[in-house]
Image (spheres, rainbow, N blue to C red):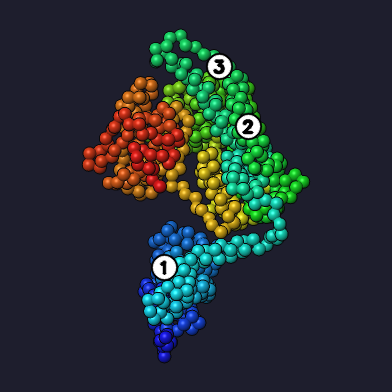
Amino acid sequence: MRILCKRPFSTLHGYVIATSLSIPGAIIITLLGGAIFGVFWGTLLVSFASSIGATLAFLVSRVLLRDWVQRKFGDYLRPLNKGIEKDGSFYLFSIRMVPLFPFFVVNLLMGLTAIRTTSFYLASQAGMLIGTVVYVNAGSELSQITSLSGLVSAPVLSSLVLLGVFPLIAKLILNGVQRNKALKRFEKPKRFDANVVVIGAGSAGLVASLITAGAKAKVILIEKHKMGGDCLNTGCVPSKAIIRSGRIMAYIRRAKEFGIDGAQGKIDFSAVMARVQGVIKTIEPHDSVERFTSLGVEVELGDAVIESPYSVKVNDRTITTRSIILATGARPFVPPIPGLNEIDYLTSDSVWSLDELPKRLLVVGGGPIGCELAQAFSNLGAEVTQVDMADRIMPREDEEVSEIVSKAFREQGIQLLTGHKLLKFGAGDSGDYMEADNNGETVRVEFDKVLLAIGRKANVEGFGLENLGLALTKQGTVEVNEYLQTSLPNIFACGDVAGPYQFTHMASFQAWFASLNAMLGGLWRSKTNYNVVPWATFTDPEVARVGLSETEAIERNIVYELTRYEMEHHDRSLADGEAHGFIKILTAPGKDKILGVTIVGHHARRGDWGVCFRHDPRNGPEENFGSDTYLSDSIGGEQICGQRLAQ
């Protein structure tokens, strides 16, 4: 028989005091409230007491700490402040509904923000109500147990199960509220033509379509240009094909190093470019409409226009869909430099139309694309000048990496102009020219062709995003959360259009999560994980990296131990005549956890050095030649001597 309390308001006062003083244990007090007062009165008393106490703790935090904490820890609180500025009440309601943090911590943290007191109280009252009912009910049922058999009674077991599934229920409710709030201005169709519409048939769109079709969901893929996207037609495939031709010519020039006399070769540039197009044609069937249709993907060729989060128009057809995946990719960025539009410039998209090798080629940009193509054209016989505003090429890598690649470039005749700010382009008597500022001095470079490789701009225009009001980042990509949802929860984005990494393998990686989350419609969601992101630059020497660079570790104040091995001591590199570069591994102090790996050298992307490191902080690195444990291609997610890269 339940014990009735004669002084309920004394208990109420106690709850308020405990909450306002931020004393942990609210769950126990809530269970006791149910045991003493029953479900109705217990819920009523605990609900008001917890909200009043939370508001008092909130006010204490605001009065005593807010100004000082914001001055000292403003950077750490930026995500919280951003959420409050966007929609403070709903942000707090979400935290209360899904109790990821102890409530007393939420009270104190929210006092440090700019949310209004009345908003805090009302959002707390509403957000905690369902949880209060669940815990009060559990306390009420437990209080009625009079024997051991009561522990397995249906009401008690049901209340305990409800306690366990409450966070999931709360999350589903919250997801539904968020979804309805974002989509309430759009009319939902009574029937749908597809489960998912994917816009863009590049790496991200193709993978997303295959995953969706493989799950037997109805998917329609829309592409306005060529199947395969940038990777097949203007990116990975053609660039690696021309790099290979250039590398063969470079080896012919070096033939005497390997004991071969009289080796000769003549560049037939039109044949090189024909080979590039031939490689594309060979791979095309893998990404063709016919193949994807045979795999269960319906393909529409034409311009897509998103009319609402539920409908997409292509050609004369309007498709209703439950979810949309944006995989529209990116295009080369063309800077607003005076005179540029008056000359015939090239980009990584249009360079493949060349049928004659430029005698003088100017490459603008010192990133991976600029470096790869600059060296490839130099190997094929062009006089290459590479210019960049940064003080070194490959600025995302450690300085010593840039130095090794820069030295190799200069040795083969590439002129590097770093620290040069573009001023203008123009046409002169002896050809087109570029002028740049270098520490106050104007530098003029004449050229026959200029290749712009400054960066890539996400494709977000021309297919209806403007009318939907979809949120974009400062970088111009579509803003997505950890589930790759945009500001409209049934529209997802992956690949270059979403970022933050514009790599082909990252586009495919993101497509997996975007397609799963799009199909499940909020019932279950999977977070993307960017802890291990590999990339490689196909210069000679090649550069491959995964995890932190040493520069990044220093910038983030991450303590590390360094293990380094020079390739000039490596047997296989010496045998290949490629004994240059190094392997550098960052590990957590005193542990085997790998924070990052950088490899510079011949075939660095493959990492097949046959060298294994066992790091002993007391004795330094120990080399183990003859190991058959290799890094994988692109060094992504595989093992280094049995130690998995930092997850």
Q: Secondary structure at mark 2?
A: helix
Number of other residues with Cα within 10 Å of mark 1, as a class: few under 14, some 14 to 19, many 20 or more: some
Comparing 269 with 572, the one in front is: 572
Comparing 538 with 115, the one in front is: 538
Q: Is residue 159 above or below residue 508?
A: below
Number of other residues with Cα within 10 Å of mark 2, as a class: few under 14, some 14 to 19, many 20 or more: some
Q: Amino acid at mark 3?
A: Ile
Residue 422 position by quadrant: top right
What numbered label is drawn on residue 102?
1
User: Do residues under tags 2 and 3 come within 8 Å of each other at their CB atoms?
Assistant: no
Horizontally, residue 555 falls left or right of residue 278, namely left
Residue drawn at 50 percent across, 82 percent down: 40
Q: Amino acid at mark 2?
A: Pro
Q: Which residue is mark 2?
A: 285
Residue at far front of view:
149
Mark toward the start of the polypeptide (2 vs 3)? 3
Q: Compute the Cα span from label 3 to label 1.
A: 69 Å
> In the picture, which quadrant includes the N terminus?
bottom left
Spot occupied by residue 445 in the image (x, y as percentages of width and height): 54, 27
Q: Secondary structure at mark 1?
A: loop
Q: Amino acid at mark 1?
A: Pro
Spot occupied by residue 361 in the image (x, y as percentages of width and height): 56, 25
The number of numbered discs placed on residues in the rendered structure image is 3
Residue drawn at 47 percent across, 20 percent down: 250
User: Do residues under tags 1 and 2 come within 8 Å of each other at their CB atoms?
Assistant: no
Residue drawn at 61 percent across, 37 percent down: 229
Number of other residues with Cα within 10 Å of mark 3, as a class: few under 14, some 14 to 19, many 20 or more: some
Q: Compute the Cα span from label 1 to label 2.
A: 55 Å
Comparing 157 with 565, the one in front is: 157
Q: Which residue is mark 3?
A: 267
Q: Compute the Cα span from label 2 to label 3.
A: 29 Å
